[in-house]
Amino acid sequence: MRNSMRKKLAYLLTLSLAILSGCNENTNRSEDKGKASGAEQPNIWPRAQKIRGLTPDQESRIEEILARMTLAEKVGQVIQADSDSVSPEDVRRYNLGSVLSGGNSAPGSLPYATAEAWIEAADAYYEASVDTTDGGVGIPIIWGIDAVHGHNNVIGGTIFPHNIALGAVNDPALVAEIAAITAQELRVTGHDWTFAPTLAVPQDDRWGRTYEGFSELPAITQKYASAIVLGLQGDPDSNTFMQGEKIIASAKHFVADGGTIGGQDQGNSEASERELYDTHGAAYIEAIEAGAQVIMASFSSWHGRKIHGDKYLLTDVLKAQIGFEGFVVGDWNAHGQVDGCSNENCPTAINAGLDMYMAPDSWKGLYENLLSQTSDGTISPARLDDAVRRILRVKMRAGLFDLVKPSARPLAGDSTILGSPRHRSVAREAVRRSLVLLKNNDNVLPVKPGLKVLVIGSSANSISDASGGWTLTWQGGGLPNSAFPNGQSILSGLQDAITDAGGSIEYSEDGSYSQKPDIVIAVYGEKPYAEFQGDVPTLLYANPDILEKLRELKAAEVKTVSLFLSGRPMWVNPLLNASDAFVAVWWPGTEGGGISDVLVANPDGTTKHDFEGTLSFSWPKHADQSQLNPGDHNYDPLFKYGFGLKYATRSTLGVLSEDVGSATTGLNKYIYFTQGRPQAPWRIKAQNSQASGTDFDAQEDALSIIFDATTGGSVSIYGEVPIDLFREMNGAMELAFTYRLDEQNSEPILLTLGCTSEPSCQGQIDISKAISQSTKGEWSDMRVSLSCFAAVGADVNAVDLPFELRGSRNAALSIANVRLIEDADGKESCPR
C-alpha cells in the first residue's frame, strides 16, 4: 500500500515537473504571441470535464516502462513514418512509435489494397515493433489512416457521404452509428487508429477541405464531435473503451484550419482568441470530454505563427488550460513549415507541445536530429518524457500492451464485414437523408410512374465521382465501378427504381437519345479533390455541355432535373435556371440507391421518402460570395442556412441573374498549357525556336517545337505574378506533360522550373535520357516531382516560370497538356 502510494506520488511529481518544464520553455515567446494575437483571459478556454485517467496500476506500469527505455527508444516513439517509406525492419531498428498510410499509401503497387493485404502488413509492422531480441522494451506501434467517410482505403469498404452531407442531416445518433461501422471495418484490416473526426468549421467555401466540415456554424460540429468520438472509441467508462470493435480517434485539425484568410489551405487565421474558441475551438472540448485520445495539430497559422510551433495553443491552452492528457500528433510534414525548421529538423515543434511528428518520408533524418537534440539539451528530458508518456498512455488505454497481433484481434480478416448489408443500409439512409431540394417548380419531383426518363452526365455511372476525395486514392475519382464491389452507382439506383415503377430509362453521357424523354435527370458537378488541390479562386461552377443540353431539352418541353455533386455550395444560377428541379446531393458515396429512394415515386404514385436534408452551408446568390455565413455583414444568400424544400412545399423559384459580377477565374496554379494554348494567366514565348500547332487528341491541341539549328533555343511558359508551390511540393505533386520526340541529337534537353529573375532560383533537369527512351513519333507522358526541381535549386515559393524546355541544335519536340498533378505512386519522379 505504501509502495503503491509512493509510486503514485513519484509519478505525480514527475508529471508536474514535466508540465512546468514544458510551460516554462520559451515563456517570453508565448507571452509575445498572446499579445500579438490579441489573446484574452485564459478562461476563454474552459477546462474539459470528465477527464478519464488510467488506474494507478496502469500509470505505474507506464512509469516502469518509461524508466527502462533508452533515449533512442524514446525518440523513436515520437515519430510516425508512412508505410510507403518505412519497412517493418525500420520499425524494429528505430523503435518507431507509429506508422501511417497516407492517402496514396497502401501495401502493394496500388494506392489502396484488399483486406488481406492490409492485415498482412499490419502483422508485419506490429511484430517488428514488439521484437525485443535486441534487448529493447518492444513497444507496439499504432497504425493510423485517414478513414474519414468510412474505411475509404480498402476494396469493398462502405463509403459514406462526406461530412458536408452529414451536416445536412443534423442527426448525432446517425453519425455515431456511422463512426461505429467505420471502426468495425478498420478492425477488419488491422488498423487501430483513424485520423477523424474533422472538426473544422469552414468560413470561406473556396477552401479545398470545405466538404470535410459539417457546417459553417459551430453548433452541429459541437454535437457531432462527441457522437463520433464515442462511436469510434466507445464509452470511456466501459471496459471495452478503444478495444474489441473500437479504435483510436483523432480530433483534427487544432485549430482554425477552417478560418484562414481567403479559404487557403494551410493558410493563416487572423481570428481573435474569442472567435478562435467560439467558432473553431469549442468542438474540441466536446471531443475531449467524450474521451478523444489524440488531437492532430493544424497545418495552418494563427496570426502568422504556424500552429505546429505555437506553444501557447498546444501547451498552454490545449494541455494546461483545457486539460487534454492524450497526445498531439502532427500533420504530413507540417512541422517543416515552422519558422527555422525543415522536414528533417524541427525541435521547435516538440518544445511547443507536439508529441508525435508525422514525418512520412522524412522520418530517418528527423530521428537523427532529434536524437542529437535530446542529447545536447535543445529538447529537455522532461519534455521528451512527457511526450512519450502521453503516447504510452494512449497505447495502454487501447490495450496494445496485451501483445496480440492485429490478425488475432476481434473482427480481423473478416471481409464479410466490409460493405455488409447492415452497413450499406446505414449508408443508404445517410444518403437519402442528406439530399437537399433547392428547387422543385411545378412539382416535377418525385419522378412519376411510367415515364420515359433520360439520364445524362458521365458522373451518373461513376461511383468514384459520387464518392469524392479521400476514396481509395488521396484525391479520389478516376476509378472504375469494379473498384467498388459493394457499391451502387446513381444510375444503377435510378434504373432499379424507375423500371420498378413501370417507366423506362435511357442513359447517355452527352444527352443524345433514341426517343424523346418525358423527363431528363442530369448528374454532374465538381470532380473529386482533396486538400489544397481543391482550393478554388471563386465559387463559380460552369458546365457548358450540360447547360446547353438542359436548355435544349427545356426548349423542347422536356422536364429537367439536376443532381449536383459537390464538396461545397457553388454559384450555379445558369444551371438552376435551366432546371425545373435541382438537388444538392453533395458527394454521397457508394450507395447511389439512396438518391432514387427519394427521387422516384412508388408504382402507385406515392412518395417513398421525402427530402429531409437542410443546408448546413449557405448557398451563394452571387459568384463572388465565397465567405457567406449567418451573422456576417450583408448576409444575403440565395438559399439561407437551414433551407431545404419538402415535397409538400409549394414553391416556385423565379429566373435568377446569370451575371457573374466581380467574380474572376483567379490565379490558375495547376493548368499551364492545354487545348493548344496557354491557360490564363500564363503566357508562352519561344526564343530561337519555331513553335506551331500540331495535333495530339484534336486539331492543333499541341505545340510543335523545333530548336534553332545553330544555337538551340527554348520555349517558356511564364507569368507576371509568382505562385507559391511549397504546399504542392510538400504534397508530392508533379509537373506533368505529354510529349512526342520528333528529332533528337546527342546534346541535352533541359526542363526548368523556378523564377524568371535569375538562374539561382531555377531548378534545371536534364530529361534527354528519359526522352531518348521513348519511341520517335509516338506520344509519351513525363512526370517530374516538384521536389526534384527544389533539390537542384528551384525556389518553389515564388514560381513564375512553371515550365521551360531548352533544346539543343536541330532537336524537335512536341508537347501537350502541361500541368501539375498528384503523385501517382507515392515515389519521387526524378528523370536521370
Image: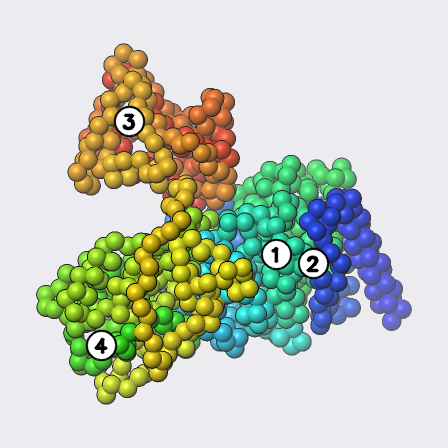
- What's the amino acid at mark 3? Ser
Q: Is residue 664 left or right of residue 78?
A: left
Q: Which residue is mark 3?
A: 772
Q: Residue at x 27, y 35 (%)?
A: 677
Residue wearing tag 4: 498
The CA span between labels 4 and 2 is: 53 Å
Q: Residues within 10 Å of mark 1 (few under 14, many from 20)?
A: many
Residue at 31%, 35% in the rendered image = 678
Classify residue 778 as left or right of residue 749: left
Between 135 and 384, the one nearer to me in the picture: 384
Lateral position of residue 270 relative to residue 40, left or right? left
Secondary structure of residue under mark 2: helix
Instruction: Say whether residue 151 is visible.
Output: no
Q: CA distance from mark 3 to mark 1?
A: 49 Å
Mark 2 or mark 3: name the one nearer the start of the chain.
2
From the viewer's perspective, tell me whether residue 725 is left or right of residue 696. Answer: right
| Front-most of residues 32 and 234 | 32
Q: Determine whether label 4 and label 2 are within 8 Å by CB.
A: no
In front of the other: 169 or 467: 169
Name which quarter of the figure residue 138 lies in: bottom right
Q: Are dots 3 and 1 in contact, CB under 8 Å?
A: no
Quarter of the figure that contains the C terminus: top left
Give the mark toward the camera: 4 or 3: 4
Q: Secondary structure at mark 1?
A: strand
766 versus 358 height, above or below: above
